[in-house]
Amino acid sequence: MTRASPQAVACRQTAAHVWGLNVLPDPAGDAWPVELIAPSHLAIPGCVTYLAPLLAEDVTEHQGVRLTTRERTALDCARWLPRMEGVAILDQFARKGVDLEALWHRPHNTWHLRDILSLADPGAASPRESWLRVILIEGGLPRPATQIAVALDGDRHAYLDLGWEEFKVAVEYDGQEHHTSPSDRQRDTDRREELRRRGWRVIAVRRDVIPGQIADLLRHVANALIESGWRPAPETTTRILRSIRAARRRERTSNSSGRGRAWSQRARRRRSDPGADWSTW
């Protein structure tokens, strides 16, 4: 595509994909256009063109494709994509060695962009782990650490996706791609039982929790932290409660439009769980 049009430079999610990041949408979803930056509009089927200036230092070639550099791609994705998706891409670039602090200090960055950069963490092992971290932080909970090492028997270690070592509370994404076989699920069960014996409370988050059960997730994690000794300030309590109410409203809106009936049923079952009682607030 960029060879056929000398003006075109692959950018945003297209460039991130070429750089080897996991950014493609669900194959069952809508078609994904090729994103290009050019000085003027290019009428190319299947492509979307953004009119924007590009410095020579922001353009390179990789795998035969002319595209924005890793640093410029990271900034463009953080600036233009929805917040959680932008953070997920920043996390992946950070794992590949992009210096996010240097990006933060680049001239002409807005405070909005710097705020998104501040949410990034190279410890996320998948985009959904990134989303999960952003949901917890923006829900008002303390920022969790990533990839927490916990010593196990036999000179082994468990690495927890997200958590608060002070309170021994962890949150892990229970994705289908890593937990499909009975042996995988048994290993998870054995590992979490061993962690429990060491005083850790591990909250497993299924794939369907995002976006359909965010309110329950925030409530469950907040309760676990409080039961483990966390004492939030009054303004933090207010922020969390507002986040939960806002998530409930979004869930009801989704359900009423017919897209979230299954999520609603699962949420009702979780709300009936006496082990996740919000009365601790």
Image (cartoon, rainbow, N blue to C red):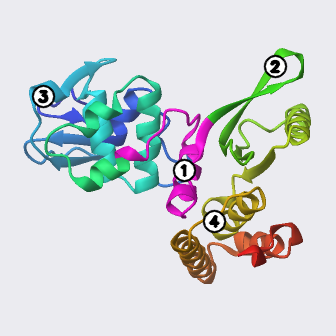
Amino acid type indicated by mark 1: Arg
52 vs 152, nearest the viewer: 152
Name the mark on residue 143: 1
- Comparing marks 4 and 1, which lies closer to the viewer? 1
Against 273, residue 191 (above or below) is above
Q: Helix, strand, or loop for circle 4?
A: helix
Residue at the spot 61% in from the left edge and 81% down from the top edge: 252
Residue bounds of the magenta highlight: 117-146
Q: Helix, strand, or loop for circle 2?
A: strand
Q: Residues within 10 Å of mark 3 (few under 14, many from 20)?
A: few
Labels 3 and 2: the sequence-earlier one: 3
Q: Is residue 99 magenta?
A: no
Name the mark on residue 156: 2
Amino acid type indicated by mark 2: Arg
- Comparing marks 3 and 2, which lies closer to the viewer? 2
Amino acid type indicated by mark 4: Ile
Name the mark on residue 214: 4
Labels 4 and 1: the sequence-earlier one: 1
